[in-house]
């Protein structure tokens, strides 16, 4: 379920804070991410629809996108490839419990994305997002971060 779906003519568009977008087809995961990140200094949106996420990336300035690896219809790696093509400056983070998948390691090595493990530690996730927003980079540090 989508926490809030808005149109490209979003009334929050004048808000200059960075926009962090979380994409996952599991409502429980989106709810947990919302609890962990809602009090941060950036704007925070969630969606369970990867196609809507791509639309937002194409029509808004999305500073950082956090996408689940396993989603119905479109994998997180495919979504993040599309994000990189549409908005190369958007920081891309893959949230996964499957970091051993060889494709994920190759994708990170090539600079496509950053990997963050499930289950996650809320403080570590908040810090990693803050650090990435401050540095403006998707990569850096170890491959797989988790608790």
Image: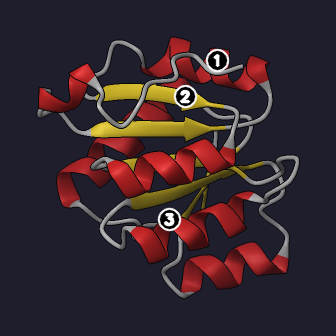
Q: Which mark is residue 127?
A: none
Q: Up-down: is 19 above or below 103?
A: above
The residue positioned 38% from the left and 43% from the top of the image is: 129
Q: Which badge, 1 or 3, comes first in the chain's sequence?
A: 1
Q: CA distance from mark 3 to mark 2?
A: 16 Å
Residue 20, horizontal then vertical, whole percent: 38, 38
Q: CA distance from mark 1 to mark 2?
A: 11 Å
Residue 81 quadrant: bottom right
**Whether label 1 touches label 3, CB < 8 Å:** no
Q: Nearer the viewer, mark 1 or mark 3?
A: 3
**Whether label 3 touches label 2, CB < 8 Å:** no
Q: CA distance from mark 1 to mark 3?
A: 23 Å
Q: Up-down: is 107 above or below 134?
A: below
Quadrant location, the N terminus: top right
The residue positioned 85% from the left and 71% from the top of the image is: 101
Q: Which residue is mark 2?
A: 46
Q: Which mark is residue 83?
A: 3
Q: Residues within 10 Å of mark 2 (few under 14, many from 20)?
A: many
């Amino acid at each position: 379920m989508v926490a809030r779906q808005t149109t490209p003519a979003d009334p929050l568009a004048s808000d200059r804070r960075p926009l962090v977008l979380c994409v996952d087809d599991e409502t429980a995961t989106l709810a947990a991410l919302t609890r962990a990140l809602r009090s941060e200094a950036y704007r925070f949106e969630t969606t369970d629809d990867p196609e809507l996420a791509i639309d937002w990336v194409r029509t808004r300035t999305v500073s950082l996108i956090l996408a689940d690896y396993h989603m119905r219809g479109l994998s997180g790696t495919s979504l993040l490839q599309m994000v990189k093509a549409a908005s190369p400056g958007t920081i891309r983070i893959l949230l996964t419990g499957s970091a051993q998948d060889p494709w994920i390691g190759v994708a990170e090595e090539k600079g496509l994305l950053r990997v963050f493990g499930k289950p996650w530690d809320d403080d570590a996730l908040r810090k990693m997002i803050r650090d990435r927003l401050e540095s403006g980079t998707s990569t850096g540090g170890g491959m797989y971060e988790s608790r």
